[in-house]
Every structure is written in C-alpha cells, then in structure tokens.
Amino acid sequence: MDEPKKLNDIWTSRWDERYSKEEFAYGEAPNNYLKAQLTKLPIGKILFPAEGEGRNAVFAAKLGWNVSAFDISSEGKNKAIKLAEKNNVSIDYQVGVLETLDFESEKFDVIALIYAHFPANIKSLYHKKFDRFLKNNGIIVFEAFSKKHIDYVTANEKVGGPKDIESLFSIDEIKSDFPNYEIIELVEQDIELNEGTYHNGIGSVIRFVGRKMDTN
C-alpha cells in the first residue's frame, strides 16, 4: 500500500470511529460563530467542507440555504442525513477527498470552514482549491484552532483539536492562503467551547470572514 493511501485510510478510520457512536461528537447545535455570521448574509448556495455529522449544514438548510457538504467519513454522512431528516431539511452530502469530488468553479456564495483541520501538508493547498469554488464577492466564514491552541490542548485534551502545531493556523497563514480577499474580520482569540463531547473548555481560535475580490 502506498503511503498517501495508507495515511488516508488511517485518517478515515479515525473519523468513522468517532462518528459511529449514537451521540453526536460535537453536538447537534451549530457552531456559534457560524450561526452569527450566516444570519447576516443573504441566503444562497453554501459549501461545508469536512462537515462531519452535519450540525452546521443542517442549521444552514433550516435558514433556507442551498447546502452542499463533504467529508471523508461515511459514518459522518449517515449521521448528517439523519439529522437533516429529523429537522425536515435536505442537504447534498458527498463522501470522499476533495480531489475526487465534482464541485463546479464559482458555484458557491459562501464556503464555511468550521474546524476544517486538514492534514498539515495539504491545508493551504485545499484553501486555494476552495477559492476556485467561490463566486466573485463570495464569502469565506472560518473558525479553527490557532497555533497558540497547542498549549490549551496539551493542558486539557477535552477542548479538542490537533496536537501538532503544523495542523493549527496563524493569522499570517490565513492572509497568505486567501490573498485576494477583503478582510471583514480576522482575529485570534480565546473562547470557551461547549460543543458535544470533543470541544469543551478554553481554546485559542482564528476567526475569519473574508470577501473574495472580483477578479473579472
């Protein structure tokens, strides 16, 4: 087995195991930052990468958004579809790595990256790929753990998040990954998380809202 395939299988197995349990790993309620941002925006088409069990996608669908999502975990998709059915909404949810999926260029009004911690060696590459899927003047909504978070997760595993600093984010990385964006908000701050079983306690996050500049 080649190393990328082996790595992907290990990564997928980890998330399938986490999402196979009856309870929702990060709860059924949407992320607070996403919730606050979506209610400010006109409804349109939205993409949720690394969407897991669907809490954020289902929230957007309940607001009337046309929702697409993906994750490497089929167990995550199963939970997301059940949650959507429970809330009487539908979401388009694909399973696979980004390279195998068929999203169109400039299709989405918003891309929501909520704790979308991809492996360190591809995270910036993925951000650049997501840019292609976003319409001109479209919005990125981003919340994920900052590099400072390594101290918090070392002290308290219950707060969750990667334990290798290269998988965490900095403000400079976000600026580099999204250079053609008007920065509406870009901050690093400590917040208290209370999301299901795996996000509990004080952590350090990067929060970013950016508007893609019209390149035509």
Image (cartoon, rainbow, N blue to C red):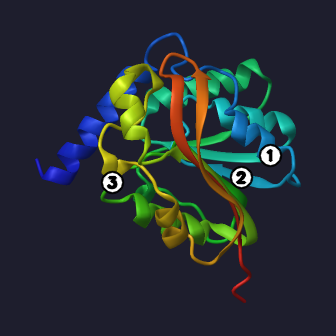
Q: Nearer the viewer, residue 158 or 138?
A: 158
- Under circle 1, the secondary element is helix
Label 1 sits on what residue type? Leu
Residue name at image x 47 percent, y 57 percent? 170
Check if mark 2's residue and mark 1's residue have beta carbons within 8 Å.
yes
Q: Quadrant of residue 86?
A: top right
How far apart are labels 3 and 1 at the CA level? Answer: 28 Å
How far apart are labels 3 and 2 at the CA level? Answer: 25 Å
- Relative to 72, is 154 on the left or the right? left
Q: Which mark is residue 25?
A: none
Which residue corresponds to mark 3?
120
Q: Please provide percent x and percent y for residue 30.
A: 69, 30
Q: Residues within 10 Å of mark 3 (few under 14, many from 20)?
A: some
Label 2 sits on what residue type? Ile
**Residue 58 to residue 64: above or below:** above
Which residue corresponds to mark 2?
46
- Under circle 2, the secondary element is strand
Can residue 119 be seen at all in this image of the molecule? Answer: no
Residue name at image x 39 percent, y 22 percent? 156
**Residue 41 to residue 164: above or below:** below
Q: Please provide percent x and percent y for residue 38.
A: 80, 46
Q: Quadrant of the C terminus?
A: bottom right
Q: Which mark is residue 38?
A: 1
Q: Please provide percent x and percent y for residue 202.
A: 53, 27
Of mark 2 and mark 1, the one earlier in the sequence is: 1
Label 3 sits on what residue type? Ala
Query: Disc 3 or disc 2, which is closer to the eye?
Result: 3
Q: Residues within 10 Å of mark 2 (few under 14, many from 20)?
A: many
How far apart are labels 2 and 1 at the CA level? Answer: 10 Å
Q: How many marks?
A: 3
- Relative to 163, is 158 on the left or the right? right
